[in-house]
Amino acid sequence: MSRLLLVSNRLPVTVKVEKDSVAVVRSAGGLATGLRRPHERSGGLWIGWPGDVSRLSDAQRSRVEAQLAEQRCVPLHLTSSEVNRYYEGYSNRVLWPLCHYMLDRIPRQDRDWEVYRKVNERFADLVAKQYQPGDIIWVHDYQLMLVPGLLRQRLPEARIGYFHHIPFPSSEVFRTLPRRDELLKGLLGADLVGFHTVSYVRHFSGSLLRQLGLDTDVDCITWEGRQVRVGAFPMGIDADAFDTLAREVGVLEDVASVRRGAEGQRLLLGIDRLDYTKGIPRRLLAVQRLLEREPSWRGRLRFVQVAVPSRTQVEAYATYREQVNELVGRINGQYGTVQNVPVHYLFRSFNEKQLAGLYRAADVMLVTPVRDGMNLVAKEFCAARPDDDGVLVLSEFAGAADEMRGALVVNTYDIEATADAIEQALKMPEAERRERMRGLRAQVKAHDVHWWVSHFLGRLQGLPTVSVNREKE
Ligand code: G6P
């Protein structure tokens, strides 16, 4: 029987150790959230890192392993040095800022490449060990860019897909990376390489041409006697699940209580991992600008910003957190009153039910990253609005802007224009809000995560059988 082997750095669940207690909690981020339900449906395996288990006792560890096995998760344990150099190091200090066009955040010397390569090999070894003929392997994201190539060496006949969840930058940016060629060749080990948008596909093809002299013929590249396909597959969410959740009595009670707390006020909402790509400072500045130029909004706006802790061991994230703290303090200091503050900043994780309550309570959702592969929060917001109300303000630098035509699309770098968009959203007549939201919801529902999975896997399975150049062997 053909199974689906999902391979990603992080499993959909992460082990959290706090003092003496151990919990297996849901992982944050678009990849884990998005693929969780397709994995539940597929009956296959998910191979990845379960988080740090080094401080667990043997008994705790075996309990965790049992829980993972129950969810068909195969753990790959990383040592603390691997976490530091492969995950925090090369993946999140080099590839993450590179793909988000933030070259000045990359350390001048890359010392972590070797460990990145070795951990990618460990992943390939574990996948090869789990592989049974006929299985389909689907590798995910920038932490594992070498894995398709390493798997091709180990399993020449395997059907391998790769999906890149973050932007693929212009070749002008990608070429700055000393290891650019190795990474491109790594991806070419797959039969199908997918991106969220047509621009990312173009950027990838541009890099292949510039770095490796490879031409893309429509959607096909010939590499080492094989054909590699590329394509845009915009990822969706489990729209029905969010829609159902947003109608639950418990959620509606949450909505009522949030609204009661903000009586006489309009509610702006932001929900992000606390990441410097998410544009939180600029968003705050836009809210501040609106309060500054339109005194009539003072006291009448409540901006709830949820920031989910993320990659806290990476310095850039700690600095960013301080910046956000400082800005929130500054705005609240300036426009707060004894009764009220404009910014309600919540630095913690929220479960799906709580998120659904916030989405449904909001008047305006602010999704304004400075750069984002797709951004699934924008889609969750729309799915969680069965009342057809609420306005989405969306950055043109999020992949989602290509599809979500009913949003107010803004250039996040233009604070004045973002403040204008927030005001337009706040003043939008009900009929226009509903018309836009109906269009957005139809789009999010039609192109949900199940559509995305079947679209990608259908393409992968439908490709001609892998032809390996045996003469070379
Ligand atoms: C983004 C990436 C994912 C990553 C997630 C959370 O969505 O595309 O690959 O898993 O962020 O980040 P973390 O570093 O905690 O896994």
Image (spheres, rainbow, N blue to C red):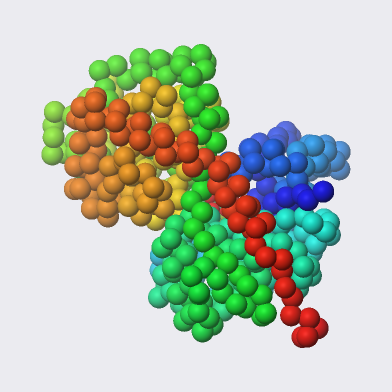
Residue 397 in the image: above or below residue 392: below
Q: Is residue 27 above or below residue 228?
A: above
Residue 18's x, y, as percent? 67, 37
Q: Position of residue 443 (x, y in %)?
A: 42, 39
Residue 364 is left or right of residue 219, and the answer is left
The structure residue drawn at horizontal position 32% and vertical position 20%, both measured from the top left corner, is: 262
Please, is residue 121 above or below residue 365 in the view? below
Residue 337: image quadrant is: top left
Q: Is residue 382 above or below residue 274?
A: above
Q: Quarter-wise, where is residue 147 in the image?
A: bottom right
- In this view, the residue in front, 417 or 157, is 157
Tell whether 146 sits left or right of 54.
left
Q: Is residue 39 visible?
A: yes
Q: Residue at x 71, y 69 (%)?
A: 466
- The image shows residue 254 at horizontal and vertical percentages of 46, 18
Residue at 48 percent across and 38 percent down: it is: 446
Residue 313, how many percent across, how many down? 56, 53
Can you say which quadrant of the picture contains the C terminus?
bottom right
Q: Is residue 182 left or right of residue 297?
A: right
**What residue lies at 53% left-to-right and 24% top-to-bottom?**
245
Question: Does the rendering let one see residue 182?
Answer: no
Horizontal arrangement in the rendering, residue 367 relative to residue 31 (left or right) = left
Of 464 and 195, the residue lying toward us: 464
Q: How many marks?
A: 0
Pick the front one: 375 or 274: 375
